[in-house]
Amino acid sequence: MGFFLTLKLRKASNTVAIEKKRDELRSDFEEFEEFSRSEELKRFSQLELFVLSDDFRNNKKMIEGKSFKRSELYQSEKLFKKYQRSRRFKTYFRLKDSSELSTYELVEASDDLTRFKELDHLKKSAKLHKKKNAEEIAEYKTLKSSSRLREYFKFQRSKAFKIYKELDTSAELKSYYKLEERISSQEFKDEKAFLLDKKRFEKTDDFKKHQEYVKLKSSGQFVKYFKLKNKNPFAEVKLWKLTFSEEFDSGSLNINKWITRYFWGDKLLDRSYSLETDLHTYTDGDNLIFSGSSASLIAKTEKKEGLIWNPKLGFVPKKFDYTSAIINTGNSFRQKYGRFEAKIKVNNPSQVQNAFWMVADKSLPHIDIFKTFNGGKIMNANFWGSETDPQRNEFTVKGIDLSKGYFIYTLDWSAGELVWKINDVPVKRQTTGVPQDAMYLNFSVAVKKPMGNLQAGMEIDWIRCYQKNRQ
């Protein structure tokens, strides 16, 4: 892990400040969304649309004394009339629907004109010989003397046609039609009538609406709303939809969400079991402690019988010197892709292996979102492949002082990428071995080495899972 990432993690170690910022952002977002749907904002938006419109501004100018002759409307009308009086425009519109132009366009598309142009080109290029091309020369003379073609070329050379061609695709003509459309509109006629009105602005409904708009805009609620709207800090919040949460505020374990055994032990044996490398047995809730709005998974020195899974012998009875706890959502919640996170504090991580992990129905795929090992270091991992060809990618995380208390551990899982985060700082990205199966949550504390004075555990403040909203 690079120096700069370690530095980022150290700077982001104030979990209280990070969570406060998150909570404030979420609270602001909820307030923002609620206000976005309010009747007050709806009314304000209607008023703003009106007050900031061209109609409103022109009406205000008109009522405060602007005359029609000094208005932009007058200039538009004046320019339009100038176009109408123009000899060029008169010539254009005279030809536009005339029989002369219609005849010209028919000849323009005729085979005779095409043939004449071909023969004329050959003649000018001296490719027609009197003897060899006598028929073509005769045809050329016939076409050249044709009254239709003579009229065609005469019209084409005319000044009127030249004016027509210049105006037909010109910006002036576009301006004319635009002016014509506007001037003939009811909106233009109404606005012209208003500009000729002598009433004062303060006596109008427009003025009353403007005063209402100003009052709303200056109110504290509106000031905060538009400040947030301009900053738009909610992109990340809007991206995610909450699908699962556990706040541990009921004082006991919610058995509709959680089981206190490995999923397959609960499913097949109706009892707990441990792995071959474990020195503890999991109890059915006896090693869970609830305080305030958190749950603690405790490992302790305690003799107890249980089962251990041996790949060759199966489930074998064993006497253990330690007990511990595991909780998972194998019966209640599974999800493919999304954001999975928990706020966790560990006590004496050098004594046990604390883990926040996800797994599918089989042992693979398996993701360690947070795991301590080897004296309390953090090593997260992704395991995939098959039992005969397992693949793994483990990585250590430096820069986190677990003695400082709570940290937020996050996994962002998409179809093509896994991103591990601690206190919102990305610590690892992986694009290989990305699971494509729905997985469930597991939290466990494991005793992996003999410990004379075992006092260790993992405290969970909350757990939250999200899925991306459709964009």
Image (tube, rainbow, N blue to C red):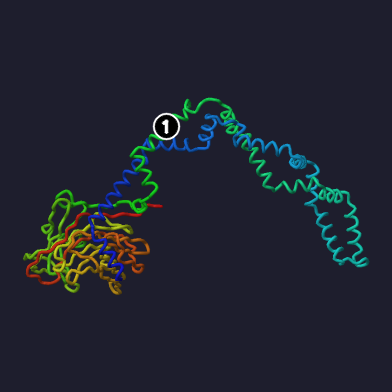
Q: Position of residue 196 (x, y in %)?
A: 58, 28
Is residue 151 something one can see in this rendering?
Answer: yes
Above or below for 212 versus 416? above
Above or below for 188 versus 404? above
Q: Quadrant of the N terminus?
A: bottom left
Q: Position of residue 410 (x, y in %)?
A: 28, 60
What amino acid does circle 1 point to?
Gln
Q: Position of residue 406 (x, y in %)?
A: 20, 59
Identify the residue shown where x is 82% and y is 54%: 113
Q: Is residue 418 left or right of residue 318?
A: right
Quarter of the figure with residue 37: top left
| Pick the front one: 19 or 286 | 19
| Pick the front one: 157 or 271 | 157
Q: Number of marks in the image?
A: 1
| Pick the front one: 77 or 419 | 77
Residue pointed to by mark 1: 211
Q: Residues within 10 Å of mark 1 (few under 14, many from 20)?
A: some
Identify the residue shown where x is 32% and y is 57%: 338
Q: Is residue 383 left or right of residue 317?
A: right
Q: Secondary structure under badge 1?
A: helix
Identify the residue shown where x is 53% and y is 32%: 59
Q: Position of residue 79 (x, y in %)?
A: 67, 38
Residue farthest to the right, as pictured: 131
